[in-house]
Amino acid sequence: MESHKNLVDQCVQGEGLVQVNVQIKAPQRRINIVDVLKPAEDYVEVAE
């Protein structure tokens, strides 16, 4: 992410299931978002 933009400014808004990979940095009291992935539809079982 660019340091002068927040998460909303840098992301595309949407709906659905995603996988978020994060790093927790306790000494700095920070959460580092490493990656946000939307799984392929054929790998996701969605209850309707």
Image (cartoon, grey):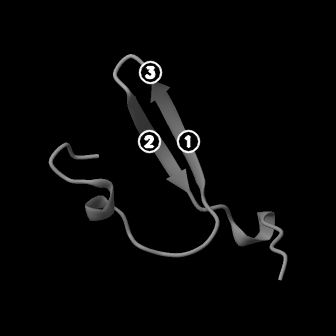
Q: Nearer the viewer, residue 7 or 43?
A: 7
Q: Which residue is mark 1?
A: 21
The numbered mark at residue 12 is none
3 and 1 marks in contact (CB < 8 Å): no
User: Which residue is label 2 attached to?
Assistant: 33
Q: CA distance from mark 3 to mark 1?
A: 16 Å
Q: Secondary structure at mark 2?
A: strand
Q: What amino acid is labelled 3 in the image? A: Ala
The number of callouts visible is: 3
SS for callout 3: loop
Residue at (78% x, 66% y) in the render: 44
How far is the residue under mark 2 from the one under mark 1? Answer: 6 Å
Q: Residues within 10 Å of mark 1 (few under 14, many from 20)?
A: few
Q: Are marks 2 and 1 in contact (CB under 8 Å)?
A: yes
Q: Residue at x 51, y 52 (%)?
A: 36
Q: Residue 9: x, y in percent?
A: 26, 63
Residue at mark 3: 26
Which residue type does callout 2 highlight? Answer: Ile
Name the one closer to the observer, 21 or 25.
25
20 lies left or right of 17: left
Counting residues from the N terminus, which is met first, the one under dot 3 or under dot 2?
3
CA distance separating discs 3 and 2: 14 Å
